[in-house]
Image (cartoon, rainbow, N blue to C red):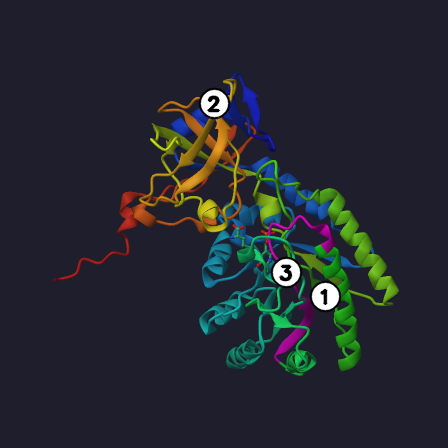
Amino acid sequence: MKFFGTMKNNSGVLEIGGIKVTELAEKYGTPLYVMDQELIEENMMKYKENFKSDKFKTTVVYASKAFLSKAICKLVEKHDLHIDAVSGGELYTIKASGISMERVHMHGNNKTDDELRMCLDYGIGSIIIDNEEEIERVSKICLEKDQKVKVMLRINIGIDAHTHEYIQTSKHSSKFGESIFDERFPEIVEKITSDKNLEFLGFHCHIGSQIFDTKAFHEGIEVMIKETKKISEKLNIEIPEINLGGGFGVYYTEKDTAIDVEKFMKSMIEHIEKSLEKESMNMKKISIEPGRSIIGNAGSTLYRVGGIKETFGGVKYVFIDGGMTDNIRPALYQAEYEAVLANKLDVVEDEIVTVAGKCCESGDLIIKNRKLGKAEAGDLLLVATTGAYGYSMSSNYNKAQRPAVVFVKDGKSAISIKRESLKDLVRNDVDMEL
Ligand code: LLP
């Protein structure tokens, strides 16, 4: 397994943030999400330091759907990032963290009126309007509240990024955004710019997630800049901002060549500066929205091994005390992961095993046919790169209790999200008179 951030081999035991995972398991129980705070902060700083220009302002917006807790919001503010939300629940969580709501930008292809009201009540930075119908609703709610709001328009730029079909977002039939190929597109933009309640900032795009093909992002830059110029000339308006979305691919297994954030941010900036010059354009601000590439490698899941089973069919299973309830990605996207016996780092990895969860579901497999040391009941198995879309997509299927999330740094650990209790599982279950 590839080591990330502060991971170290401490006499055969994996250490993260200066703490042996055996101690973490003892103290907090398993399954446990372990977040390497130093690596999260390092990633945030890498984006801040490399995605900047003296020709325009830049903003790095952390995509909170990857992982959201009050602690991560505080780190967002500490490193002067912004943060996006895509639901009332995410908005509420961010608000509860106490950070400045001007840093918040609201997404969603089907925001409810209540969510839009929340945006105005909380005084968030901007709303990213998804479609024509939403323009009128946002405007109506502004009128109702006698408030104005800054908005962007999410546009579909038709770039075919090579990633899993479920996380592609910019194909012509995607449910997100308004297509720039639609002949009514200028009319839709004009609806926003002519609305007194809305302050139009510019266009937003997001071409997909876990993308390694850097050409797709470069193509995105070209299209976004050209389109902005075209529309601003056609409607004779100034368009001060564009947001290029996130989606920068990270390492899960040896099949993935992660995007080098430092290099790639520099090359994006260079490309943007050149394109703006070529088009004789000025932009006030350019934003990006990384989620996975900030938090993905910084998070791991620590499990306790239970049974080991060798089937008649020849598969050797290592059973763990979690599974698809804390990591749905293998079942949903055929995602692959690396793992290690975290209390036995020095044993030879000479067995081919399948790591299976404890859900009543044959597809509840976290890792299929990978090398691992000989596991025994009671061992600790750590799966790497579960920081993004792990906790945030977790569920209570089979009444599993969501694991705790613990942050580790410099030999200290602290709980960011508590483990769900059995009581939590029935907190909304009403005793009916039957
Ligand atoms: N901005 C927008 C508008 C997005 O929709 C997303 C992700 C991001 C930014 C951040 O993308 P990232 O940098 O994290 O790739 N559940 C899937 C991923 C879904 C991504 C949804 N949108 C997974 O587990 O792979």
Q: Residue 59 occupies which quadrant of the picture?
A: bottom right
Label 1 sits on residue: 241
Q: Which residue is drawn at 69% across and 50% down?
A: 213
Q: Is residue 106 left or right of residue 261?
A: left
Q: Which residue is drawn at 47% across and 34% down?
A: 369
**Considering depth in this image, is 210 or 408 the residue closer to the camera?**
210
Q: Which mark is residue 318?
A: none
Q: In which quarter of the image is ligand 1?
A: bottom right
Q: Distance between the residues labelled 3 and 2?
A: 40 Å
**Considering depth in this image, is 264 or 191 the residue closer to the camera?**
264
Q: How far apart are marks 2 and 1 (CA)?
A: 52 Å
Q: Which residue is drawn at 84% across and 67% down?
A: 281
Q: Is residue 201 left or right of residue 21?
A: right
- Foreground label between 3 and 2: 2
Callout 1: SS: strand
Label 2 sits on residue: 373
Can residue 320 be seen here? The reply is yes
Q: Is label 3 within 8 A of ligand 1 (CB to nearest ligand atom)? A: yes
Relative to 22, say whether 270 is above or below.
below
Relative to 162, say whether 176 is above or below.
below
Q: How far apart are marks 1 and 3 (CA)?
A: 15 Å
**Quadrant of the snapshot with the N terminus:** top right
Label 3 sits on residue: 206
Cβ atoms at labels 1 and 3 below 8 Å apart: no
Q: Residue 401 occupies which quadrant of the picture?
A: top left
Residue 314 at what x, y percent from top left? 39, 30
Q: Is residue 125 left or right of residue 369?
A: right
Magenta-drawn segment: 197-215
**Considering depth in this image, is 29 or 395 the residue closer to the camera?**
395
**Considering depth in this image, is 145 or 176 the residue closer to the camera?**
176
- Residue type at numbered disc 2: Gly
Disc 3 residue crowd, few under 14, some 14–19, many 20+, Cα 10 Å: many
